[in-house]
Image (cartoon, grey):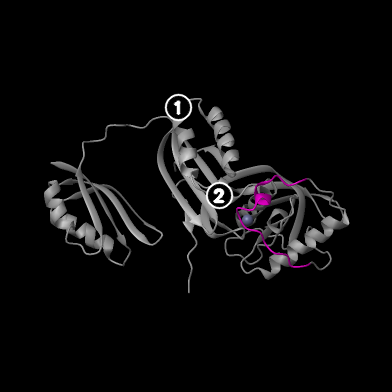
Amino acid sequence: MHELAITVIGPDRPGIVADVSEALAAVGANLTDSTMTRLRGHFTMTLICTGPSPAEAEAAIGTLSGVVTQVRQVSPETYASSGEPYVVSVHGADRLGIVAAVTRVVAAAGGNITDLSTRLAGTLYVLVAEIDLPPAAADELAEQLAVAGAELGVEVTLRRAEPEIL
Amino acid sequence: MIAWDGPAGRVLPVVTAPAPVLSAVGAEVDPCSPEIVQLAADLVATMRVSPGCVGLAAPQVGVGAQVFCVDVTGHPKASTTHGVFVLCNAKVIEASRWKAGREGCMSVPDLTGDVKRAGRVVVSATLPGSGEPVTVTTDAFEARALQHEIDHCAGKLFLDRVAGAHAVYQRKVYL
Ligand SMILES: [Zn+2]
């Protein structure tokens, strides 16, 4: 049994998710974790699947027209993130290096980014990241993020993520 | 009782992020001053001409002050409603029944986001003109609108409270 990491990127069109998943199902690939979104109109899909060999998977999705695909064999999860969940919001005028500066500050505090998205809307740049933080690291990180935000001229908020358990 | 009953206002241009005034803490105001009564009137006038606008805060018209108007009358998600009203120096003094919901903002016209807000709030404030202290108890959509506008007066946008990395959405454009 192989575990594969696959990326598919191309111009968005109706039916593209169905085409990708059908092609993979045809070679016995079982999709485990996957994410699909549109980034400025580009279709992007990243997934982990089990089953076929890399060559079989490549042959299956390599015939899809208009998309760039990559298949790579991976080993089972090696880094289990632990810590306290927090959310970082950043917004301000678009400029070079916002993501790099903010994520470097998070990394220096021992934070692990588990999910991140950015949007450019007009001149407004928005970054939202979910992070796992070591115990008691939040106050100091909040101060460092405030310093980085002031240097970048953007607003930064760090707050505890509260899971909705119903 | 808290309904707005003031002079006619002027329609002002609405500023959009990343304008610095939207991220600055608004000043406490003297609700009886003529400038604040005029500002209140202008906020109401600007809200009324803006389609879908259920609330507008002073920073959104470029004034760093703790004044906002709200009108959720007839909104499908509203339960308790107080009509059109303007509050000065408002503070949330009780909040409960937290619930996530999708929010937009005239100052962030291209994005919406999922934000957890209290479904029931008690807000203390003063009314423009009379300076009368009031306590507003409300729920559902009017409670959400009050929290959104009180945030504006504190220099906060819904972007500062979104639930996670996948809780910000490009506003759909229907042609
Ligand atoms: Zn707003």
User: Crowding near pointer 1: few (<14 within 10 Å), some, many (20+)?
Assistant: some
Q: Which residue is mark 2?
A: B159
Kindly give the residue lying farthest to the top in the view shown. Answer: A136
Quadrant of ligand 1: it is bottom right
Residue at (45%, 46%) from the top-left corner?
A: B165
Name the foreground residue: B90 vs A48: A48
Name the foreground residue: B153 vs A69: A69
Let me know if residue B101 appears in the view.
no
Q: Which residue is mark 1?
A: A134
Image quarter of residue B77: bottom right
Give the chain of mark 2.
Answer: B
User: Which element type, helix, strand or loop, lies under badge 2?
Assistant: helix
- Which amino acid type is marked by label 1? Pro
Image quarter of residue B42: bottom right
Classify the position of the N terminus of chain B by image quarter.
bottom right
User: Residue B41: where, in percent of width, then height?
Assistant: 79, 63
Image disc number at residue A72: none
User: Residue A55: where, in percent of width, then height?
Assistant: 12, 49
